[in-house]
Structure formats: C-alpha cells, structure tokens
C-alpha cells in the first residue's frame, strides 16, 4: 500500500521509524531512518528497520564475502524498488522478501510517491564488507 502521508505510514510501520540515518546519509539520496532491531554485541545476525521518505534511495552497493554473506530485505510498510545491475527493477510492497547474494551490485529505496520501510538482514559470512558505489541518478530513478 502506498503511503504519501507520514502519519498514516507511521501507524503501518510496525517496527518503528527509528532515528535519522546520519552515519550512512552520504550513501542515500533523500532522507532515511534506521531502527536497529538486534544488538551486534548480543546477536550474530544484525537486523534493522530502514525507513525511506518518498523518493529516497540508497546508492548502488555490493555486499562482499569470502563465504556466506549477502543481504535479505523483508518489506514491512509502503512501496519501494529493488534493482540489480543489468536487470529490470522489482516493485516492492509489504510482505515482499528479496534475497541478495554476495557480490551482486544493487540498490533499493522508496517509490517517488510512497514512504517505504524494510528490515535489512546482514547475512553472516566470512570476511564480509559493504562497498558503497555511485548514486542512482535522478535520470535512472525517474524512468521507473
């Protein structure tokens, strides 16, 4: 369901909007919010609810890993986009689950006209890291 109104979105976003995503703001076009759901010191699997304002998206990026690794996206509220390099974009809505293998260049974010939230799961692995790349240009994004 699309949410253009932030107040209506808040009532649907069951895992909470969280705080301004200041630490990663340079990797996002638009404003995003982060609500950690697990503590990395207490749990080997990190989960966070990431919220995107309408039109917000993250840069192209790759989750590297020697073994294991990658990312899962569990869409919880609103509507968004996911795209792997060289492939058609995938429309995201509540209940969509995306499995992102390691070493795949991709991006994800909100649709132009909807708030969007997903739980991001960092898949455990050996020698994991994220490589942040170029932004998704307005030209690329506006074609969706």
Image (spheres, rainbow, N blue to C red):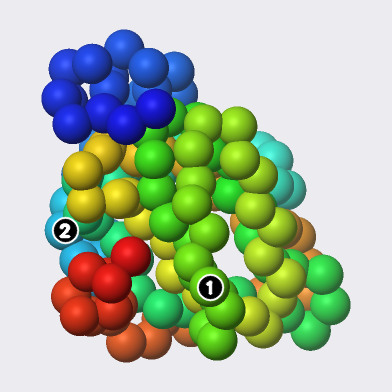
How far apart marks 1 and 2 lie (CA) works out to: 22 Å
Instruction: Name the residue that disc number 1 marks.
Output: 88
Q: Is residue 120 visible?
A: yes
Query: Upstream in the sequence, badge 1 or badge 2?
Result: 2
Q: Is residue 18 visible?
A: no
- Disc ID at residue 19: none
Relative to 102, residue 90 above or below: above
Which residue shows up at 69% across the image and 40% down it?
A: 43
Relative to 118, residue 84 above or below: below
Within-10-Å neighbours for mark 1: few <14, some 14–19, many 20+:
few
Which residue shows up at 41% across the image and 78% down it?
A: 60
Residue 86 is situated, as x and y percent measured from the top left of the image, at 55, 86
User: Considering depth in this image, is 140 or 8 the residue closer to the camera?
Assistant: 140
Element under label 2? loop
User: Considering depth in this image, is 96 or 34 the residue closer to the camera?
Assistant: 96
- Which image quadrant: the N terminus? top left
Element under label 1? loop
Residue 28 is situated, as x and y percent measured from the top left of the image, at 26, 66
Say which quarter of the image contains residue 144: bottom left
Please give the count of numbered marks on the rendered protein.
2
Instruction: Name the residue that disc number 2 marks.
Output: 30
Relative to 71, residue 134 above or below: below
Within-10-Å neighbours for mark 2: few <14, some 14–19, many 20+:
some
Residue 17 is situated, as x and y percent measured from the top left of the image, at 31, 30
Look at discs 1 and 2 and give the one toward the viewer. 1
Residues marked 1 and 2 touching at CB (< 8 Å): no
Residue 52 is situated, as x and y percent measured from the top left of the image, at 29, 46
Relative to 25, residue 85 above or below: below
């Amino acid at each position: 369901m699309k949410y253009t109104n932030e107040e209506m979105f808040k009532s649907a976003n069951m895992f909470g909007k969280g705080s301004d995503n200041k630490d990663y703001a340079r990797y996002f076009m638009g404003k995003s919010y982060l609500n950690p759901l697990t503590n990395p010191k207490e749990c080997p699997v990190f989960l966070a609810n990431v919220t995107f304002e309408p039109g917000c998206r993250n840069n192209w990026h790759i989750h590297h890993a020697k073994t294991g690794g990658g990312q899962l996206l569990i869409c919880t509220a609103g509507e968004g986009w996911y795209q792997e390099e060289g492939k058609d974009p995938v429309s995201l809505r509540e209940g969509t689950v995306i499995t992102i293998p390691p070493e795949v260049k991709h991006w994800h974010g909100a649709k132009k006209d909807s708030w969007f939230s997903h739980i991001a799961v960092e898949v455990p692995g050996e020698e994991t890291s994220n490589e942040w790349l170029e932004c998704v240009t307005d030209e690329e994004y506006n074609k969706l």
